[in-house]
Each structure stands twice: as structure tokens, then as C-alpha cells.
């Protein structure tokens, strides 16, 4: 199992090829590619590489699936006996990214498994 820890959208997140993750909104169009170049750690089947703070030449490739909004978070303020009440809500803007591959110095360490295309049988 290979994974990487990357810094994206102000957070550090553990990513694996073939999985999707919701990050804070990225300035990329849907179905566009995004490259994470701030890679902090790579684990390649037990062989761990740690950066100081980032690993030189390490990248994680991903595809933006879509842009969405997170669950609503309610913020309710109240002061008892003072007739003070405020109710506000917030929905975070998110981007869903599918991780395609993890690369180190130009060579692909881990890649998402692609499904083979459906083969139609020939009619004889």
C-alpha cells in the first residue's frame, strides 16, 4: 500500500491513488488536472521518504471531479436573560479530487488501477 501526505488548501492530508478527497475550493475547472507539489511524506510499501519540509521532485497527480458545498454548520449565539439570540449558518466551498498517481523524481511509484475497457464479442 503506497500513500503520500500532501499539503493542499491549507491542510495536510493523507492520499492514496484511486480514492477521492474533498478539499477546500481549488482554482481549477471541473475535469481538469491538478498537481500537488508540496509532498511531505511518501510511503512506498514500507519504504518511507520524509521531506525537509517538502520532498524534492515528488508530485501527486489528481483529477478534479466536481465542485460542491459541504454540510451546513449552524452557529448559534445566545445570552440568557438578555433577549440576545443570533443564528447563522455556513457551508464550506469544496473541491472533490480523484488521486491518479504518486511520482518521485519523474518515476511513478503508485498509480490508480484503471478498469479494462469492455470488449464486445465479434459476431460470426
Image (cartoon, rainbow, N blue to C red):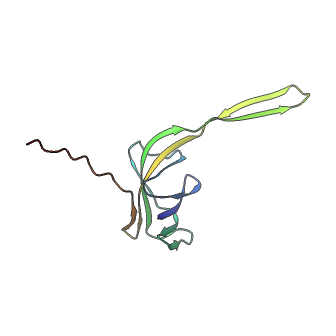
Q: Where is residue 97? Give x, y as percent.
A: 46, 48
Please identify the quarter of the rendering in which residue 81 is found.
Answer: top right
| Left or right of residue 116: residue 68 | right
Mark count = 0
| Left or right of residue 80: residue 22 | left
Determine the residue positioned at 40% across, 71% down.
105
Determine the residue positioned at 13% across, 44% down.
122
| Left or right of residue 121: residue 51 | right
Q: Is residue 34 above or below residue 105?
A: above
Screen quadrant of the C terminus? top left
Determine the residue positioned at 47% across, 61% down.
37
Q: Is residue 11 above or below residue 94?
A: below
Q: Residue furthest top?
A: 83
Q: Where is residue 85? Give x, y as percent.
A: 81, 28
Q: Residue furthest right?
A: 81
Q: Residue furthest left?
A: 124
Q: Where is residue 93? Give x, y as percent.
A: 55, 40
Asked whether 42 or 106 is in front, the reply is: 42
Q: Where is residue 83? Give x, y as percent.
A: 87, 25
Determine the residue positioned at 83% across, 32% down.
78
Q: Is residue 106 above or below residue 117?
A: below
Amino acid at each position: 500500500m503506497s500513500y503520500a501526505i500532501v499539503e493542499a488548501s491549507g491542510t495536510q492530508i493523507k492520499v492514496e491513488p484511486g480514492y477521492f478527497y474533498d478539499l477546500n475550493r481549488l482554482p481549477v475547472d471541473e475535469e481538469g488536472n491538478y498537481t500537488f507539489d508540496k509532498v511531505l511524506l511518501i510511503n512506498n510499501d514500507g519504504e518511507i521518504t520524509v521531506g525537509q519540509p517538502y520532498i524534492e521532485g515528488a508530485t501527486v497527480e489528481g483529477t478534479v471531479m466536481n465542485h460542491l458545498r459541504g454540510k451546513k454548520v449552524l452557529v448559534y449565539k445566545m445570552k440568557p436573560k438578555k433577549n440576545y439570540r443570533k443564528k447563522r449558518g455556513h457551508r464550506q466551498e469544496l473541491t472533490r479530487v480523484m488521486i491518479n498517481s504518486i511520482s518521485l523524481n519523474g518515476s511513478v511509484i503508485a498509480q490508480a488501477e484503471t478498469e479494462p475497457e469492455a470488449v464486445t464479442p465479434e459476431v460470426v
